[in-house]
Image (cartoon, rainbow, N blue to C red):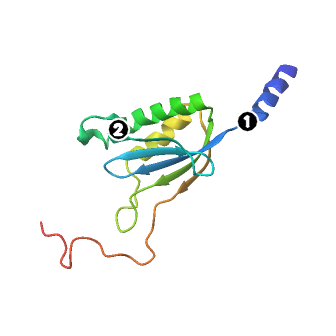
Amino acid sequence: LSILFSKFLMQISKKYIFGILHIYASKNNTFVHITDVSSKETIIRMSAGMRINPEKKEKSSYSALTIAKEVCSICKDIGINAFHVKMRAKGGNHSRVLGPGAHIVLRTMIRSGFKIGRIEDTTPTPTNCTRKKGGRRGRRV
């Protein structure tokens, strides 16, 4: 009984050092940006295009996985063990749907042992729609 109680106390007394995980996932690329809690100090910033060579593979889920693993290792070295997540899509008068890399990055962070505080969607939404591209009669194919 005392062993179980001591393990329970160790779990309670564990300190979480938070960072903010900004994920920007468009349909062509995935950006991961980690800052401190005030969002003023950048810890690491990485995109799929920085790690994957052929441009056509930037949008793949594998490229998002590789940058997430690299970011995980750097954050563990620094000592961050928990994140608040801010996910963002293209937004505005473009698509408000997250790209394929966003969920892969989040899942990789959880699997590598990081705790997640809160998750929020920071995709910009227009209050009065700005004009979409394509002209008055639309795109003619």
Q: Nearer the viewer, residue 33 or 133?
A: 33
Residue 46, position as x, y percentages in the image: 42, 41
Residue 118, position as x, y percentages in the image: 61, 50
The answer to whether 57 appears left or right of 37 in the picture is: left
Task: Report whether residue 1 is seen.
Answer: no
- Give the number of the disc on residue 139: none
What crowding class fits label 1: few (fewer than 14 Cα within 10 Å), some (14-19), or many (20 or more)? few
The answer to whether 51 appears left or right of 78 in the picture is: left
Q: Residue at x 67, y 39 (%)?
A: 17
Q: Which residue is mark 1?
A: 15
The answer to whether 11 appears left or right of 40 in the picture is: right
Q: Residue furthest front?
A: 41
Residue 2, position as x, y percentages in the image: 87, 21
Q: Residue furthest right?
A: 2
Q: Residue at x 52, y 31 (%)?
A: 74
Residue 81, position as x, y percentages in the image: 63, 35
Task: Report whether residue 48 is seen.
Answer: yes
Q: Residue furthest left?
A: 141
Q: Which residue is mark 2?
A: 50
Please, is residue 25 above or below residue 3 in the view?
A: below
